[in-house]
Image (cartoon, coloured by chain):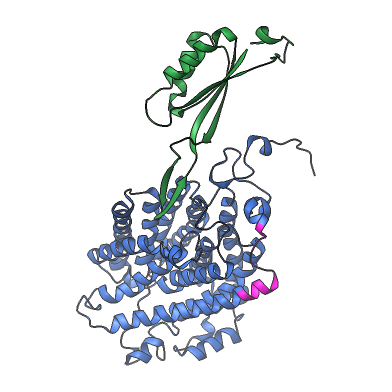
Amino acid sequence: MENGYYTWMLVSASLVLLMTAPGLALFYGGMSRTKSVLNMLMMSFSALGVVGIVYALWGWSMSYSTGFANVDGKAGKEIAMLFSDPFNQFGLEKTDPANYVFVAFQLTFAVITAALISGAVADRLKFSAWLLFLPIWVTLSYFPLAHMVFGGGFLSGAEGGLADLLFSGKDGAEVAPIDYAGGTVVHINAGVAGLVLALLLGKRIGFGKDPMKPHNLTLTMIGAGLLWFGWFGFNVGSIINLDAYTTETGLVWLNTTLATCAAMLGWLAVEKFRDGHATSLGAASGVVAGLVAITPACGNLVPWSSMVLGLVAGAVCALAVGLKYKFGYDDSLDVVGVHLVGGLIGTVGVGFLASNGGGLLTGGGPKQLVVQIAIAVFAMLWSGLATLIVALFVKAVIGLRIAEDDEVEGIDFVEHGESAYDFGTGGGARRASVLSSSTTSATER
Amino acid sequence: MKLVTAVIKPHKWEDVREALETFGVTGMTVSEVSGYGRQKGHTEVYRGAEYDIALVPKIRIEIVVDDADTEDVVGIITKTAHTGRIGDGKVWVSPIDTVVRVRTGDQDAAAL
């Protein structure tokens, strides 16, 4: 059994890595315009580069530090400890190698959470600002939340934690919060961060006026498929209890898939009814919305309730992506509409549907629901405040947004010196004609 | 000599090329272009947001022909590219002063 555990954790970690690069990169890249697709891909890849290293240096140390074994919830105490000695396992030298598979797995979670944010800032965020934002954001927002939820901290069922404060039981909360694989830590966190960044950055030039349609939905469909595949590592790999493997592995896989199937259909149904067509972008988006929603709930639902949750998530997210036009924030690729809204549906939804009589609709009374709402609200507040601080800092130091002319020209060429395609002029490309892309001299520099 | 320029629907391009070849046209310049006429493009919906797509993809054919062949060439294109629905395109003819074949220096009719 032990060997099986190590094998599966390595496979899971690798699957979650695939979700960021190339899964998420392609999903977002296809939705970008031809003049900014490379920058979009680069934001995912650079998140892997930067956060991967930061995770080994002090991310693991902060998120799962065994140095603070008995934090017992208590927000103030936990945070003080996290930041008073964030480097106690710096560079993993003092980490037990037997834990390395778990470090690997959690590293990939931190990476994709940061990469998810990039969808909100398409076309206009300085690449240098992104690179500076990444390490500080994971330090102030991701690692603390990961410790609170996964590391037995304030948002777990521990004594002195939020759930314990609401409904105290013996040795901790009467009703422990449910967040199986990161509805709060990953999706609500990334969604709120995306919203804050989109608000601080402002709208793209021409938002709501120019056609900013996806330039290549084939890439987006490939990306969505890779995300789905990688998500089996994300969710099924989150079973950390060896004894639960026989009863939970199949359940979590099935719940993950069934919710996603239902969410895709839910999204398409809304589109067909409202817009007249079921679109490929809708299918890809519904898939991701379903995966997001089932993430916190995948171990605490049964197949039928997973389908219900997925269907609701797909339909509601299909409506929620329109909010940005109503409220006028340019969350370019819908990080808020899919990840924040989907994360909330999953985190709160499990309070209604939790199996074994735990949820409001499954005979368990309102306590689980109240706890779920409480952790979701806390995660939103934490992420919002942390992101605001980091973003304002980056803005003060190097600025967030590229120059207006550069944005019109296209961020790919301005920030990376490249253009993605050598043909066509569709989708807003300015440097893609045959003449401007032909090489006049290929001399060495 | 005349320059015949035709902007037609992309799916009609193969038919038009075949018909012109059968007639004896030996060469032409073809490009993928986009534009709009009276039909003014169409709308597309992405994640619930509606976009006006003003430009419709078309094929532009340019052929330099002898004065005598002009009417036939225009007739062949008009007949072959015709579907009767909106957006079939246009054909126009303009006069040409001089044509030179780059390889040989041949001029005008000899260069065609």
Hey, which quadrant is residue B98 in on the image? top right
Q: The blue chain is which one?
A: A
| Residue A1 in sight from this viewpoint | no
Closer-to-camera residue (A357/B74): B74
Toward the viewer: A118 or B104?
B104
The chain that appears green in the image is B
Residue projecting furthest to the left: A363
Q: Assess whether residue A309 is covered by the magenta stretch.
A: no
Q: What stretch is highlighted in magenta?
A: A392-404
Q: Quadrant of residue A83?
A: bottom right
Q: In this picture, is A199 found above or below A277?
A: below
Give x and y (percent) for residue A412: 63, 52
Taking depth in this image into account, of A306 and A388 the one nearest to the observer is A388
In the shown orientation, is residue A237 left or right of residue A97? left
The quadrant the N terminus of chain A occupies is bottom left
Residue at 71% of width from left, 36% of height from top?
A: A439
| Residue plotted at (33% across, 72% down) | A243
